Image (cartoon, rainbow, N blue to C red):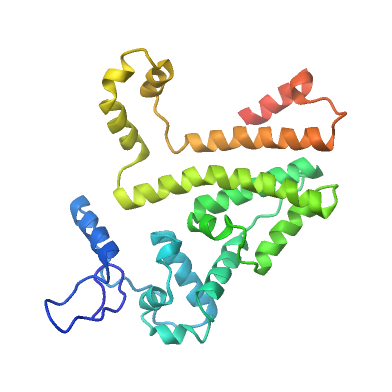
Amino acid sequence: MRCAQCGAEITHPTRGRPRRYCGRSCQARAYRARKDGAVPRRSFVDSEAAAPLDRDLVVRAAIRLADDEGLAAVSMRLVAARLGASTMSLYRHVSGKDDLVTAMVDTVLADHRPPPPGATGWRALLDHEAREEWALYRRHPWSLAALGTTRPPLGRSVLETVDRFLAALPLDHRTALSVYLLVSGYVQGTAMMAVAESEAVRDTGVSARGWWHDRLGRLAGVVGSNRYPWLTELAADPPTPADLEGWFDFGLRRVLDGIAAFLEPDEPREAHDPGAAGSAAADRRR
């Protein structure tokens, strides 16, 4: 018997009614799906389950599971259930969960796009790398949990990512690594909001606009009191997930400005150069 939500095998107790779900998490997801009128994901088996197992098939099934349920949901048992295979059969292709997560990260990082032909100089290259990392977390929110740590999975793609970044900087490797951590730390910090919102929508079915509308409705008296003028403005134009892109863009430009002040202390900054400021404004409009 398999879980009616995720498809994992269930070990039934010797007494009592047979279980339909492998745990409380799947039971809660099934309840929310029924409440929202969604079609339950019964016996969730990948369309590729009939194909002979290999490492790539296992890794891509794990990525799809993580995209749907988050990295915490990834286990050898649930990946096997998606593939309609036994758990032990997966160990012929990956040695365990750590090996699986490393391969998952390597696979999604391999989608990295090279910089455009006109992107030269450290700033253009760092800007490109930062935006590629941001796009990764938007496509695969679970990857933030895997990479936002002091002990990331050190697969080939991770090492190549850091190497590209350090090679773009005219600094010794130790100082360049500090710059890398600054930029990547900013990207990951901002991505936390995007990932949290993605997970909240997945788990509750409530959009950001719906959440803000409900909370601002509860604060109607405070909003109209003029005690917090910024809250009155927020109520007139509540934030949306799309605003994250603008916030990310603004912050990244300021981070790169700070690195420029460190690398090129004698160069005029945009704020003091009307031509440069105009050019930057034109870039933002584009």
Tell me which residue sits at (65%, 67%) in the image.
Answer: 154
What residue is rendered at 67% in x and 25% in y? 281
Q: Residue at x 54, y 42 (%)?
A: 190
Quadrant location of the C terminus in the rendered image? top right
Residue 148 appears in which quarter of the rendering?
Answer: bottom right
Instruction: Look at the image and tell me whether residue 120 can be seen.
Output: no
Residue 213 in the figure: left or right of residue 234: left
Q: Tell me the quadrant of the picture where the N terminus can be found.
A: bottom left
Location of residue 113 with respect to 94 vertically, above or below: above
Front residue of 252/14: it is 14
234 up-or-down from 154: above or below = above
Residue 284 in sight? yes
Q: Please tell me which residue lies in front, 123 or 189.
A: 189
Residue 90, image x, y percentages: 46, 83
| Residue ID at (57%, 38%) | 248
Q: Position of residue 250 (x, y in %)?
A: 61, 32
* Residue at the extreme left: 16
Where residue 21 sits, quadrant-wise, is bottom left
Residue 103 at x, y percent in the picture? 57, 71
Q: Position of residue 276 (x, y in %)?
A: 77, 24
Image-based side of 156 in relation to 45, left or right = right
Viewer-closest of 133 and 282 = 133
**Is 27 placed above or below 133 here?**
below
User: Hey, which residue is sitting farthest right in the picture?
Assistant: 266
Between residue 53 and residue 217, name the one nearer to us. Answer: 217
State the image quarter where residue 50 is shown.
Answer: bottom left
- Say above or below: 165 vs 284: below
Identity of the residue furthest to the top in this view: 226
